[in-house]
Image (tube, rainbow, N blue to C red):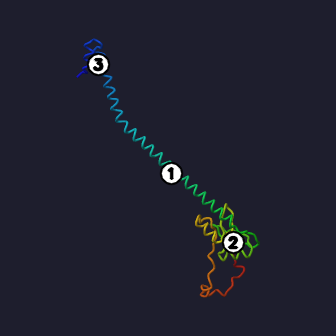
């Protein structure tokens, strides 16, 4: 089963049998390499596609983390702006004790601020390790963004109708029990 062109070249004396056998051997080797490469190409292609998919997944994860970090920064900036715009001066000689986490903290205020804090009109928020006094409405807006910033927000005082049923409403709280 030789090639008719090869037969013609051999008859014309341009090539000999040794050269024809070498050419046929080279052709077989090339066909064998080509068939081996066809089997390896899909595996290499699969590995390449898998690597691309993994890289895309890592990129998506990094983008998601960056987006979450930007959102946290934006919320922190909003909280900072709310606190700085609505800050109440905390100055006075009356110590107001409150719990932050597991520790009792102390803030010095005047008597009017202490009453407003106790009534729920003023709240205590924590910003950059410092405690600030803000109106209760602002504390609610801060809590909507990050509840961990609001340290103390008392419930507003009850109305007169609810105090009618309170058997202790007529009794005053002694001064030494004010915390």
* Mark toward the viewer: 2 or 1: 1
- Mark 3 falls on what kind of element? helix
Whether tag 3 and tag 1 are in contact, CB under 8 A, the answer is no
**Pointer 1: residues within 10 angstroms few (<14), some, or many (20+)?**
few
Q: Residue furthest left?
A: 1
Q: Which mark is residue 61?
A: 1
- Mark 2 falls on what kind of element? strand
Q: Residue at x 67, y 76 (%)?
A: 118
* Quadrant in which the C terminus is drawn: bottom right
Which residue is nearer to you in this view: 171 or 89? 89
Q: Report x, y in % for residue 52.
A: 45, 43
**Pointer 2: residues within 10 angstroms few (<14), some, or many (20+)?**
some
Residue under numbered circle 2: 97
* Quadrant in which the N terminus is drawn: top left
Q: Report x, y in % for residue 139.
A: 63, 69
Q: Report x, y in % for residue 148.
A: 60, 65
In the rendered image, the vertical position of residue 5 relative to residue 105, given as above or below: above
Does residue 108 appear left or right of residue 157 in this picture? right
Residue under numbered circle 3: 21
Q: Residue at x 29, y 15 (%)?
A: 18
Q: Residue at x 26, y 12 (%)?
A: 12
Q: Residue at x 62, y 61 (%)?
A: 78
Q: Residue furthest top?
A: 13
């Amino acid at each position: 089963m030789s090639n008719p062109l090869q037969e013609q070249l051999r008859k014309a004396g341009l090539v000999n049998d040794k050269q024809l056998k070498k050419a046929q051997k080279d052709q077989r080797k090339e066909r064998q390499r080509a068939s081996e490469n066809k089997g390896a190409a899909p595996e290499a292609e699969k590995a390449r596609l898998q690597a691309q998919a993994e890289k895309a997944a890592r990129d998506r994860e990094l983008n998601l983390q960056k987006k979450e970090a930007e959102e946290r920064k934006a919320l922190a900036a909003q909280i900072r702006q709310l606190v700085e715009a609505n800050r109440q001066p905390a100055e006075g000689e009356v110590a107001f004790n409150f719990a932050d986490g597991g520790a009792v903290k102390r803030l010095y205020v005047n008597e009017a601020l202490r009453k407003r804090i106790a009534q729920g009109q003023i709240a205590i928020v924590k910003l950059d390790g410092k405690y600030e006094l803000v109106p209760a409405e602002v504390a609610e807006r801060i809590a909507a963004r990050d509840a961990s910033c609001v340290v103390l927000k008392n419930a507003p005082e009850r109305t007169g109708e609810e105090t009618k049923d309170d058997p202790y409403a007529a009794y005053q709280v002694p001064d030494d029990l004010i915390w």
